[in-house]
Amino acid sequence: MALEPLMDKKFLTELAHAKMPFGKYQGKYLIDLPEYYVIWYKNKGFPSGKLGNQLMMVYELKLNGLENLLRNIRNNFQSK
């Protein structure tokens, strides 16, 4: 996973406010999805498109223990 998205304020702000659009966790912030669920997607294959890219980044953040980075952004910056 390239680090370029981590340097993009707009990307991080959108990711911090992104919610799961369907399924059992519909409406839950992506960063707050249970770790086992994100790992399941990693093993199954992330969906294509924007949601897949966001879930891939959430996986990397969780893997490295950086979930609070997005939670802090979500609490301090409004989505545009």
Image: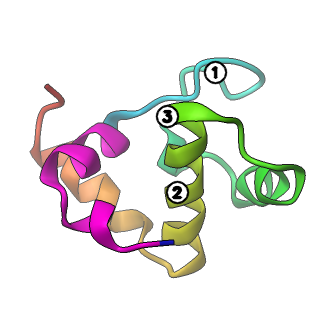
**Residue 15, image x, y percentages:** 36, 43
Mark 1 Cα shell of 10 Å, populated few (<14), some (14-19), many (≥20): few
For the residue labelled by badge 1, is the local secondary structure a helix, a strand or a loop?
loop
Q: Nearer the viewer, residue 5 or 59?
A: 5
Magenta: main secondary structure: helix
Pointer 3 or 2: first along the chain = 3
The disc placed on residue 58 is 2
Q: Are marks 3 and 2 in contact (CB under 8 Å)?
A: no
Quarter holding residue 72: bottom left
Where are the magenta residues, as a range?
2-16
Vertical order, 22 against 68 (above or below): above
In this rendering, the answer to whether 68 lies above or below 30 is below
Q: Secondary structure at mark 2?
A: helix
Task: Please determine whether, in this image, residue 26 is positioned above or below residue 45.
Answer: above
Q: Disc 1 marks which residue?
A: 26
Q: Nearer the viewer, mark 3 or mark 2?
A: 3
| Numbered mark located on residue 50 in the image | 3
> Does the magenta-highlighted stretch encompass residue 29?
no
Q: Amino acid at mark 3?
A: Lys
Numbered badge on residue 44: none
Asked if residue 58 lies left or right of residue 79, the reply is right
Closer to the observer: label 1 or label 3?
Answer: 3
> Amino acid under label 1?
Gln
Q: Earlier in the sequence, mark 2 or mark 1?
A: 1
How far apart are labels 3 and 2 at the CA level? 12 Å
